[in-house]
Image (cartoon, coloured by chain):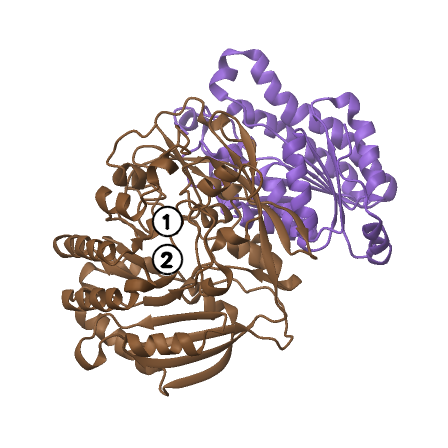
Chain colours: A brown, B purple
Amino acid sequence: MPHSVADPQPAKTATSAFESWGRYPRYDATIVPLNWQSDFPGVMAGLHGGALPVGLGRSYGDVCLLKDGNLLQTTGMDRLLNFDPVTGILTAEAGVSLAKILDFAVPRGFFLSVTPGTKYVTLGGAIACDIHGKNHEFAGSFGNHVPSFELVRSDGSRRVCSPTENPDWYAATIGGMGLTGVITWAQLKLRPIVSRKIDYEGIQFHGIDEFLDLKQRYQHVEYTVSWVDCASTGRNFARGVFMLGEHSKAPGELKPSPERKLVFPFDLPGFALNHTTVSIFNSVFFHKQIKPHVKTVQDYEPYFYPLDAVLHWNRMYGKRGLVQFQYAIPWQHAKEGTISILREIAKSGLASFLAVLKAFGDIPSLGMMSFPQAGIMLALDFPIKPDLTFPLLQRLGDMTLEFGGRLYAAKDAAMTPAQFQAFYPQWQRFAQFRDPRLNSSFWERVTGGQSTL
Amino acid sequence: MSTLVTRPLDAALAASSEAVIAKKILVLGATSGIAEATCRIWAAEGAQLFLVARNAEKLAAVAADLKLRGASYVGAAVADLDDTDKHAELLTHAVNSLTGMDIAFLAHGILGDQARGEQEFEHAAQIIYTNFIAPVSLLTWLANYCVQRHAGVIAVLSSVAGERGRRSNYIYGSSKAGLTAFLSGLRNRIDREGVTVMTIKPGPVNTSMTAHMNIKKADVNKVAKTIVKAIDKRVDTLYVPFLFLPIMFIVRHIPERIFKKLNF
């Protein structure tokens, strides 16, 4: 039965007990499991150093790490507590994964209102990063579908937070990177579906203008995302595939998902991903769609979670790991910013596959530190080549700032304190909500190591 | 002892038509890691469950979860199973709430602190009381209940630690050794009455009980799956993971003059 299938836990190695998905940076930390809503803050007694609540370790950089600290792993707190099939509101403990929520919801005719590109994230992590999905224009981000949750602080105080009850704590915790306290349970509003199927359309485009035209033409379609080729220059610059999807309206079978089988078995050597292999991959991906316009019906699993089919696909990047880069630039400079940044990336020759381009809509996020804002979002990974990758990321960060955009903490391993504080000028106000016993390597890095409380 | 979940009308109605298939299962120590994982499988099968645990808040969360996962009925009672005087009342209430019982799953127990138990007799006695004496009281009642009906499975979590006393955990181990011996005798007595007595001997399993232990541990969901299957097949003794069958054979047969010098 799907209920008994374990979520893939973060890889554990001798050098680092808990890895983020990018496997960079790596820090030693003590893992302290939280199995019950009442475990925190009791478990803090006798612990040395700070702590950070973490889930399945699917954020990329160091937001889920705390060097030489304690990681409060919430995945044992995974109980479903209540479900109202009229409102679609599920109440669950924060360590439950979205995969488990789908196992429960889909056979009952419900789906996540917002889903990221992997289902192996926890409910608490999804709130803490205020994650977004392919339907941002329609649904906003994850926090927009979380009517309430409980926040427990290291002083033992417990608060139910909602837009009307403790609204400041509610706003600080959504997108709050786990720093405001431990979320024990949360409500999540699910949306009805009548089928597992997605009506899919893929359309090739060449250049940002065509992308924007397609976005305009298909603004009535719920899920839109584009794969974009960041490696090509010249005639093929910014070519891509615009991918549309909608939950099929024809009633279909709502059976639970089968277990996954494939695991990426070993670390590829560092040289395996280079400009040539990546260019070949990108050409294949572009031409895999032989016709410029394809229409089909597919299951939601390959549509939303193509990479979940292969566990630990991040091993493809070898032991050195990867870094992600993801910006959101407001419409005012979205087009020129995206073209300039894509040029810079193509010129660097460091681009990898799986670059994702998407328009964010104008539904405001509820979190004080949320990432999404109306405009264009670009996300891609870079393999780590120490002399090249980080200088490039600094340039790209500065360009993002110049164009009025910002970077996403959950995908970041390279922002400087100056960049972060310019992207999120409200950070000092947020710092007042941080739990004094909680900290992350990300927070230490971007606040310049200074103690904020 | 208090009842947390009363039987809802719809479940009672559903049960009347499903009574043939839905297993009626009593779980003692329902908030233990192995018990909870096992109950999730039973819940998905639509079983009727009665849960007993010490901590009301944890029990409420587990009960709510199992109900949502598909259990056709979930009853629950908060009880400290060290309180053997209350056992008859508790078990009567549980069996009445379930309107019968097909499976009793005894999963409560404590690991205790070996180092402390070496110095304090009271702590050693506590470990043996919770893991051995209290189950004897429960098993006496349950065995007699099942014998009268010539039906039922009594599945009990013992441990591979009971196979041979080791310096690192012989107090816990001896409590489980006593339990294993008791179960073997009980099986010898009542198997012929149509009652299955099952001794489950897990190796180290990844649960909150073993969170501090830095060793290779089995996945609790796989262990739970194995237990559910074994109960369906009415197995007498189950080593889980199965590899512990040969491992413990070797451990039992190491000559004492060598064994006494080993560190494990």
Q: Is residue A422 visible?
A: yes
Label 1: which residue? A11
**Residue type of the residue flagged with mark 1:** Ala
Q: Quadrant of the N terminus of chain B?
A: top right
**Percent position (x, y) of residue A300?**
51, 69
The answer to whether the residue labelled 2 contacts the one labelled 1, judged by CB atoms less than 8 Å apart, is yes
Q: Is residue B2 left or right of residue B41?
A: right
Q: Is residue A50 left or right of residue B95?
A: left
Q: Residues within 10 Å of mark 2 (few under 14, many from 20)?
A: many
> Outermost residue toward the bottom?
A291
**Percent position (x, y) of residue B76?**
74, 37
Front-most of residues A218 and A100: A218
B80 in relation to A426, above or below: above
Q: Which mark is residue A312?
A: 2
A341 in relation to A22, above or below: below
**Percent position (x, y) of residue A453?**
35, 27
Q: Quadrant of the C terminus of chain B?
A: top left
**Residue type of the residue flagged with mark 2:** His
Q: Is residue A6 visible?
A: no
A184 in relation to A409, above or below: above
**Percent position (x, y) of residue B33?**
57, 39
Query: In terms of image quadrants, where is residue A290?
Result: bottom left
Q: Is residue A103 left or right of residue A233?
A: right
Q: Residue at x 30, y 53 (%)?
A: A407
Q: Is residue A243 left or right of residue A379?
A: right
